Amino acid sequence: MNVRVCVPTQLRDLIAGASVVEVSVGGASDRVTTVATVLDALAARHPALERRIREEQGQTRPHVNVFVGSDNVRDRDGPATPVYASEELSIVPAVSGG
Amino acid sequence: MFRGHSRQGDGSGGGLERATGSSPGVEATVQLGDVRETQRDEFGMWRDRARFELSGPTFAGEEVYATCIDTRSATPRLFTGSSSNHWGPVLRRSDDLGVTWTEDEQAALRFPDGADASLARIWQLAPGPNDEPDVMYAGVEPAALFRSDDGGRSFSLVSGLWDHPHRTQWQPGGGGLCLHTVLVHPQESDRLLIAISAAGVYRSDDAGSSWRASNHGIVVGFVPDGEVLEFGQCVHKVARDAADPERLYLQHHGGIYRSDDGGEAWTAITGIAGMDFGFPVVAHPSQPSTAYLLPLESDEYRCTPDGQCIVWRTTDAGETWEPLTTGLPQRDAHLTVLRDGFTTDGQDPAGLYFGTRTGEVYASTDDGDSWRLLAEHLPPVMSLRAAPIAV
């Protein structure tokens, strides 16, 4: 299955200016995967982009939020949060400021 | 970054001169935090280092704690270690004096699987021995040393230090648990000295395979039994004497020290009355027994004392110190200069440059006798480097 990952403005230089990158995970007929699997696929294809999102040990950086649809995965099952074929992942910088 | 030029010989002093001819010239690069400064003159008059031009910001919004100008190869190479609050640390390099920058697709600097650590910040990027131009060192947070053997394209964790039994007991300083100083012995390249806040000095005589704490004589005022502590010193910076490679100068969290035996033992220098706190220490690049300090008031008030910005110079290895004030603000100047915010360009007379947390950059091109303001209203200056470059 293919999953669309929406990339914030600050990181688009890493993917030639695109706002969305599509990654392929699992088999073509799969209907569900996880956030971690999507990010692993992103790491293989766009490692410089993925390491802006996750540290070496695999944790999502503290001031980065990952959304599945409109849900922050921190409020769900974190990296184990399911991603269905119809859903998009969004990378969103936390406000982290005044 | 700054770009700057020497004054031409017509005495007009007007305008910025660009090197436009085909003959080789010399460019001095001053690279700092978010900006870089260069100086160029192809007419052999670069030593006056008269004019500078600011460019940038580069990597706007990122903190640049580490900069490096590597002039050991025919093509000078710049490095930056920066970090974004959101997106983490990045190592970049440039082979065209900062016109374009490269970040390796596979991160050049990262902890290996199994290290159970993630790179938080790059604190130091240091060229290796002069006769091994592909060797680079990087000091990072959490405190670790990395070595590159391919000119900074990839780095490997120096496991001899990472596996040191002291490591689990190291405590972070105010800036984090950072390895901020890497000194390679100029004649015996297997001899390395590193410093960590707040673990102290460690030395290796076998190119990093094994390490030992080397803090004898450095008194720690912030813990009981601080006079006999093997490690745990909050060393802020160490510099090596130009003429005697066994002579080192050290700015501690509380105290200034000198070693005459390569760091085996340290002796307190007490020549600047009442001033024992500060971050940087810089050795003159060619004159023996000559070093510079920029003390701050205290641990509690980390600004230049009494509103006076004073660089102190010793020419007798710390026995006596001379205040240098010409051109520096002497009232209402509450400035902070951090450990890598003070540097030299390696020339004689020495160019000395320091940047402040409030965005000023001062320069001296006469060994510190006089100073001038190169720039102000910049972001906090965390790292500053300068070097002459043939162009």
Image (cartoon, coloured by chain):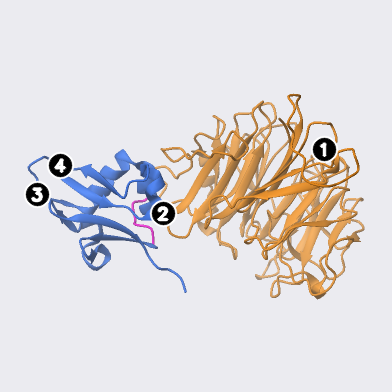
Residue A56 visible, this orientation: no
Q: Is residue A58 magenta?
A: yes
- For mark 3, give the secondary structure: loop
Q: Can you identify the residue that label 3 sits on?
A: A31
Which of these two is toward me, B15 or B25?
A: B15
Q: Is residue B71 magenta?
A: no
- Give me the chain letter of mark 2: A
Which chain, by letter, is orange? Answer: B
Q: Residue furthest left?
A: A29
Q: Rounded to the nearest whole Å, what is the CA distance between mark 4 and mark 3?
A: 9 Å
Q: Quadrant of residue B10?
A: top right
Amino acid found under the numbered disc labelled 3: Arg
Q: Rounded to the nearest whole Å, what is the CA distance between mark 1 and mark 4?
A: 61 Å
Q: Chain A's colour?
A: blue
Left or right: B358 as drawn, with respect to B50:
left
Instruction: Magenta stretch: give its range.
Output: A56-62
Left or right: B227 as drawn, with respect to B365:
left
- Give me the chain letter of mark 1: B
Q: Residue at x 57, y 55 (%)?
A: B178
Which of these two is toward me, B128 or B99?
A: B99
In the rendered image, residues at marks 2 and 3 fall on the same chain: yes
Which of these two is toward me, B177 or A4?
A: A4
The circle on residue A10 is 2
Q: Can you identify the residue that label 4 sits on?
A: A26
Please state, as top left, top right, bottom left or bottom right, where the N terminus of chain A lies in the image: top left
The circle on residue B46 is 1
Amino acid found under the numbered disc labelled 4: Gly
Amino acid found under the numbered disc labelled 1: Trp
Are the residues at dot 2 and dot 3 in contact (C-beta closer than 8 Å)? no
Nearer-N-terminus badge (2/3): 2
